[in-house]
């Protein structure tokens, strides 16, 4: 059985996701954003196999070093286009289309540039962990020099909106939504240019 545990941390209200199963205790952590002691406490009793950072903005990895110190056997992963945004030692690169299996979870990596050049989303049946690519009501910010509005719209349209309507979107900040709720708004977002 797959389990998603969500905790909101830090001054920006970042969502941290802990994916695990009920039987083997293996887990994946998505975005070690802040409040490392709290995250480490939530991981008690689990075998953390990987920490995946959805993009290189600092509010998504401030707790990474301390979480990894508590779980030294875990891998740290980020897309290579954002790798330089994290402090040394750098994490291992994520590749578009790569599959990451831990416990009952089989995630597929989708490279979704636009918020940053190396932004990624992670998809599993019924779930999309969208980082700062897609939120309820629109795409993530695309401020220069790293953001690119045309790229984020293409990422959402071509990579995310092909998923089933009932796919739950778990964003990097704020509440969940579904692909079916967001898809009809695409043309409005394009017209507004944000």
Image (spheres, rainbow, N blue to C red):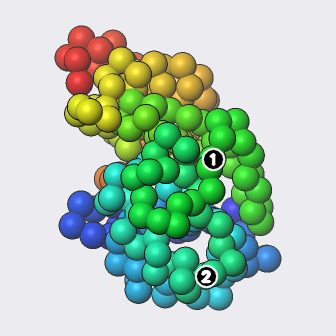
Q: Distance between the residues labelled 2 and 1?
A: 20 Å
Estimate the x, y position of residue 120 in percent, counting from the top left: 52, 41
The C terminus is located in which quarter?
A: top left
Residue ID for mark 2: 71
Residue 34 numbered tag:
none
Badge 2 marks a residue whose secondary structure is loop
Can residue 17 be seen in this snapshot? Answer: no
Residue ID for mark 1: 94
Vertical comparison of 96 with 74: above or below = above
Estimate the x, y position of residue 76 in percent, counting from the top left: 59, 63
Vertical comparison of 44 with 177: above or below = below
Estimate the x, y position of residue 140 in percent, counting from the top left: 32, 37
Task: Identify the residue at image location x=49%, y=87%.
Answer: 41
Badge 1 marks a residue whose secondary structure is loop
Q: Earlier in the sequence, mark 2 or mark 1?
A: 2
Q: In this view, does 29 lie to the left or right of 66?
A: right
Q: How crowded is mark 1: few (under 14 residues within 10 Å), some or many (20 or more)?
A: many
Between residues 50 and 189, which one lies in front from this camera angle? 50
Q: In this view, does 93 lie to the left or right of 172?
A: right
Task: Identify the residue at image location x=54%, y=19%.
Answer: 158
Estimate the x, y position of residue 71 in percent, counting from the top left: 61, 82
Q: How many marks?
A: 2
């Amino acid at each position: 059985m797959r389990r998603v545990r969500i905790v909101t941390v830090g001054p920006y209200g970042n969502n941290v996701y802990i994916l695990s199963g009920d039987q083997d205790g293996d887990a994946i952590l998505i975005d070690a954003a802040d409040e490392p002691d709290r995250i480490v406490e939530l991981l008690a009793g689990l075998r953390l196999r990987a920490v995946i950072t959805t993009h290189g903005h600092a509010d998504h990895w401030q707790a990474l070093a301390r979480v990894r110190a508590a779980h030294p056997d875990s891998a740290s992963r980020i897309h290579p286009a954002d790798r330089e945004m994290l402090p040394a030692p750098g994490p291992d690169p994520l590749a578009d289309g790569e599959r990451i299996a831990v416990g009952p979870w089989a995630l597929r990596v989708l490279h979704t540039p636009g918020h940053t050049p190396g932004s990624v989303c992670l998809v599993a049946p019924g779930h999309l962990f969208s980082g700062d690519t897609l939120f309820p009501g629109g795409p993530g910010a695309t401020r220069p020099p790293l953001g690119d509005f045309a790229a984020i719209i293409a990422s959402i349209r071509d990579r995310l909106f092909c998923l089933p309507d009932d796919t739950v979107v778990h964003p990097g900040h704020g509440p969940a939504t579904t692909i079916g709720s967001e898809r009809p708004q695409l043309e409005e977002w394009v017209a507004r240019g944000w």
